[in-house]
Amino acid sequence: AKDAGRNTYRFFEDRMNAQAYQRLMLETALRRAIERNELALHYQPQMGMPEGHVVGCEALLRWTSRDLGEVPPHRFIPVAETSGLILPIGDWVLREACRQQRQWASEGRPDVRVAINISAIQFRHAGFETRLKDILDETGADPAQIELEITESALMQAGSDIVDRLWGLRDMGFTLALDDFGTGYSSLAYLKRFPIHRLKIDRSFVKDLPDDAEDRAIASATMSLARDLGMAVVAEGVETAAQRDFLVAGGCRILQGYFYGKPVPATVFTDTWLSAEVE
Ligand code: C2E
Ligand code: CA
Ligand code: CA
Ligand code: CA
């Protein structure tokens, strides 16, 4: 029994080492990702309802590492966050997405809004507003066409000045979206005070619509709450016509998901979603 215990321990130790090693490999490779030009943004269309045309997109980060190949965001974003690398990477994302908005505007599509994911760590960082301002100046992007997606948990972790900061970002002209809504623990009392334009219903609540009774209740409650608070609702992860119909009937005005299109590189997005639409 003693041996077995020791073996179990050794097994865990090896596993821990393997995990720590994996992490170190990722972090080392990620540290060079920007200079090696391995990062890219893909863009997923967001469709305005009920008309069903493109109103914008969400920028989603992709990393093709020379050493590790394609690494998905759910593997490298947490490493970027614990290592602090999310700050330079987040800056890169902001600059690249703003540059792209500006480019689409100059190509005759100033109406295409670009949503950008902001990490809690990035948002908490003291220099965040200054960085944003610099990047706007540098790229010439229109803040009204830039949507900052901040997660529910990031807002909850923020300090007591959170409401003032959100007003500050709004005054700078940005659109503000509360991402992954329903997955954290937003107090509804707080939500009322947040000057947010949009609630983004998390994919986990959309996935089993319209069959699942609980998800129907959560989605409907979110849509009516948003309406009462004067916010718009964006649904992500829409994969079927039945999900679309349920969400549109509930008053959701913007849909995003594989039903419409997957995230694609900017050039593909332009060809697929913007060129054909010139009227
Ligand atoms: P998220 O912000 O919730 O983004 C939505 C995720 O759902 C994306 O995964 C998107 O590709 C995926 N998705 C969209 N529609 C569908 C659908 O119909 N079906 C399914 N099965 N999936 C769908 P992705 O690109 O792998 O990103 C995962 C997460 O990584 C994002 O979740 C976000 O939290 C984070 N992330 C991605 N890019 C960035 C970034 O630039 N900065 C930061 N801080 N986080 C990012
Ligand atoms: Ca998002
Ligand atoms: Ca989500
Ligand atoms: Ca259920």
Image: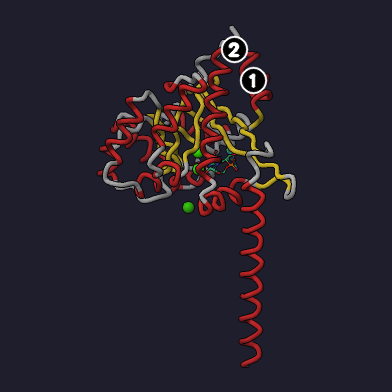
Specify the farthest residue to the top: 279
> x and y percent of residue 202 in the render?
47, 42
> x and y percent of residue 184 in the render?
40, 50
Task: Specify whether tag 2 is near ligand 1 (CB below 8 Å).
Answer: no
Q: Mark 1 or 2 closer to N-term?
A: 2
User: Which residue is identified by label 1?
Assistant: 270
Q: Which residue type carries mark 2?
A: Glu
For residue 157, which numbered disc appears in the image? none
> x and y percent of residue 206 in the render?
50, 41
* Image point (31%, 36%), residue name: 165
Compared across the picture, whether 178 is left or right of 138 comes to left
Task: Specify whether tag 1 is near ligand 1 (CB below 8 Å).
Answer: no
User: Which residue is identified by label 2?
Assistant: 107
| Disc 2 element | loop
Are discs 1 and 2 less than 8 Å apart at CB?
yes
Q: Can you say whether 218 is above or below 111 in the image?
A: below
Q: Nearer the viewer, residue 19 or 243?
A: 19
Query: Looking at the image, can residue 62 be seen?
Result: yes
* Image point (40%, 48%), residue name: 153
Classify residue 101 by image quadrant: top right
Q: Which residue type carries mark 1?
A: Thr
> x and y percent of residue 95 in the render?
53, 29
Compared across the picture, whether 136 is left or right of 265 comes to left
Q: Nearer the viewer, residue 144 or 53?
A: 144
* Image point (67%, 56%), residue name: 25
| Disc 1 element | helix
| Numbered disc in front, either 1 or 2 | 2
